[in-house]
Amino acid sequence: MKKFFLVFALLGTLQAKTYTKDVVMPNMSFSIPVDKNIIVMQRNCQWCHSYGYIINMGKQNEAFWRHIVHKMRDTFKAPISEQDEKIVLEYLMKYFGKQD
Ligand code: HEC
């Protein structure tokens, strides 16, 4: 038992030594185009994660974005109203949409 504690203490000391440097986190801001519907995007799509999730998807078709918005509402329980869903989809198709 004593040996176990000794090894444990030693490991603790080694680990403490590893974390002596300051960790600097990158500060990234993801901005999306501002138009009359930005307020709807803000109130529906920004309070769980950044717009980076949207930007990273690249240009997608309407079926893709509809699926995403429904996933946010049904799986992650985002309270997106029917009216807001239409506006969000219109916005996503305008700036992150493609026809196919
Ligand atoms: C209630 C919280 C919540 C809200 C509000 C929300 N999301 Fe998400 N979103 C999530 C979670 C949780 C994930 C998954 C994160 C992960 O897998 O790391 C996610 C992931 C995503 C992804 C990555 C693709 C994927 O399928 O995982 C996209 C794109 C996305 N969200 C777009 C949106 C859009 C557009 C809105 C606004 C309509 C929105 N989110 C609002 C919680 C939310």
Image (cartoon, grey):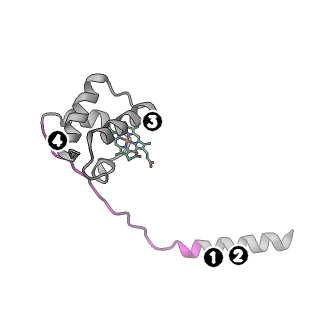
Q: Quadrant of ligand 1?
A: top left
Report if the CB atoms under discs 2 and 1 are less than 8 Å apart.
Answer: yes
Q: Earlier in the sequence, mark 1 or mark 3?
A: 1
Q: Which residue is found at the position 45% from the left and 35% from the top? A: 76
Amino acid type of the residue that numbered disc 4 sits on in the rendered structure:
Lys
Please state the horizontal and vertical placement of residue 40, each as a whole percent of the image.
Answer: 23, 32
Q: Which mark is residue 76?
A: 3
CA–CA distance in space, label 1 to label 3: 41 Å
Q: Earlier in the sequence, mark 2 or mark 4?
A: 2
Q: Is mark 3 within 8 Å of ligand 1?
A: yes
Report if the CB atoms under discs 1 and 4 are less than 8 Å apart.
Answer: no
Crowd class of label 4 (few under 14; some 14 to 19; many from 20; radius 10 Å): few
Amino acid type of the residue that numbered disc 3 sits on in the rendered structure:
Phe
Q: Which residue is found at the position 50% from the left and 73% from the top? A: 20
Query: Please, is residue 9 above or below residue 90 in the view?
Result: below
Quarter assignment of residue 47: top left
Helix, strand, or loop for circle 4?
helix
**Quarter that holds the C terminus:** top left
CA–CA distance in space, label 2 to label 1: 6 Å
Q: Given the current orientation, which residue lies at the most extreme right position?
A: 1
Front-most of 13 and 85?
85
* First to last magenta residue range: 16-35
Helix, strand, or loop for circle 3?
loop
Q: Which residue is found at the position 70% from the left and 75% from the top? A: 10
